[in-house]
Image: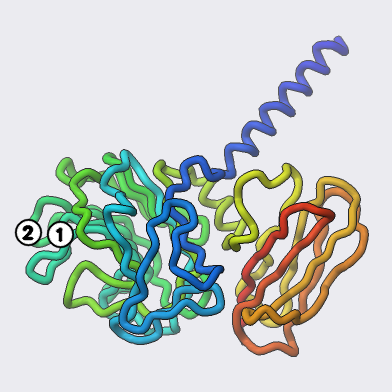
Amino acid sequence: MKIKLTYLLLSILILTASLFAQVDPGTQNLKHSWTFEDGTANDYVGGANGYLMGGAVIQDGALVTAELNQYLDLIPEDVALNTYDAFTCEIWFQSFPDSNTNYYMFFYFGNTENGMGTNGYFMTPARGDNVSKTAISCWVETAYQGEDGANGPEYDDGILHHMVSTLDNKEIALYIDGVETGRTPLQARNTIDGLAPVHCYLCKSGYDGDATWRGMIMECNIFNRILTSDEILFLFQKGTTAVENPIANLPQGYGLLQNYPNPFNPTTTISFNLQRRSRVNITVYDMLGRQVVELLNEVKDAGQSSIQFDGSNLSSGLYLCKMQNDGQPILTKKMMLLK
């Protein structure tokens, strides 16, 4: 009886561990990643480095497009979305409040003919019809008449959001802040290999008549497969990833969670996990690298712990929370204080 019970418990533990491991998509299928943490538009995974256009800048770990005609130009042959059987595009963003009230795209891959986007794919958090949207359209002269898309609520509120689009040759889906908001089957002509590798932009549309999107993109990642809803929720809860926080090869049971709430005013909770009882240091920095406050520098037990951060005496803006622990990788999360 004891042997059977032990075997049952062991099976449950193995199954639980397997399910947990499947939640984190890891880096095996991560093909492109623009984090802007090093002050450049370089793709530190796939080498599809970007070019700042129209006065766009990288500031405080984000691509900033504050004025019209500012965007990031990417080489479409290097991004190569049209060569995938399926893909997932993940973007962390924050608009300038109420700045994008017409028609905009903040990710576009495709062609432009006679001023119209054709054979293209896009994502946008705000449009003139007051929705967020991701869509694909191939082999029609007037692209929007043949597009298949998934919609969600419009976000042009100046708050940090997470947007994910998944696409294969059967359907397209949209997730915002970890929750699926729409899913649509594709017409036969709308296939990934029908996308034209002519243009690829961040913060710019494939339609000449559309204005450029104004706001900040903190991170853009592309995976060459469909991520599951659990994986997308994991990425949302995990938060944005800094260069010094590689998402591969982190020890199991060790991690810095995204603060909650985020954005916050004026207090937020920071949680972290330790493999073993050890000394941990939690420090907050501003985006110029100046230390704001050391929140914790003491020995903590293994497992999850939480601390409070009070930003009452700080200005609104982005801050970095850094965690160091006895030779483990330094982990970093972005936090947004909005007053």
Whether residue 175 is visible to the viewer of this picture, yes or no, is no
Question: Horizontally, is 167 left or right of 232 in the view?
Answer: left
Please tell me which of labels 2 and 1 falls first in the chain: 1
Q: Which mark is residue 43?
A: none
Considering the numbered disc 2 on the image, is that residue within a helix, a strand or a loop? loop
Q: Quadrant of the C terminus?
A: bottom right
Q: Marks 2 and 1, how far apart in space?
A: 7 Å
Amino acid of disc 2? Glu
Q: Residue at x 32, y 77 (%)?
A: 53
Q: Residue at x 51, y 50 (%)?
A: 232
Q: How many marks?
A: 2
Residue 238, position as x, y percentages in the image: 62, 56
Q: Residues within 10 Å of mark 2 (few under 14, many from 20)?
A: some
Whether residue 279 is visible to the viewer of this picture, yes or no, is yes
Q: Residue at x 87, y 46 (%)?
A: 276
Residue 203, position as x, y percentages in the image: 34, 72
Question: Horizontally, is 89 left or right of 251 in the view?
Answer: left
Please state which of residues 107 and 311 is positioned toward the viewer in this rendering.
107
Q: Residues within 10 Å of mark 1 (few under 14, many from 20)?
A: many
Question: Horizontally, is 226 left or right of 22 in the view?
Answer: left
Q: Quadrant of the N terminus?
A: top right
Q: Residue at x 70, y 26 (%)?
A: 14
Considering the numbered disc 1 on the image, is that residue within a helix, a strand or a loop? strand
Question: Dot 1 corresponds to which residue?
Answer: 118
Question: Dot 2 corresponds to which residue?
Answer: 141
Residue 277, position as x, y percentages in the image: 90, 50
Amino acid of disc 1? Thr
Q: Are marks 2 and 1 in contact (CB under 8 Å)?
A: yes
Please state which of residues 311 and 156 is positioned toward the viewer in this rendering.
311
Asked if residue 295 is positioned above or below residue 32 in the image, the reply reads below
Question: Horizontally, is 248 left or right of 208 in the view?
Answer: right
Residue 269, position as x, y percentages in the image: 74, 68
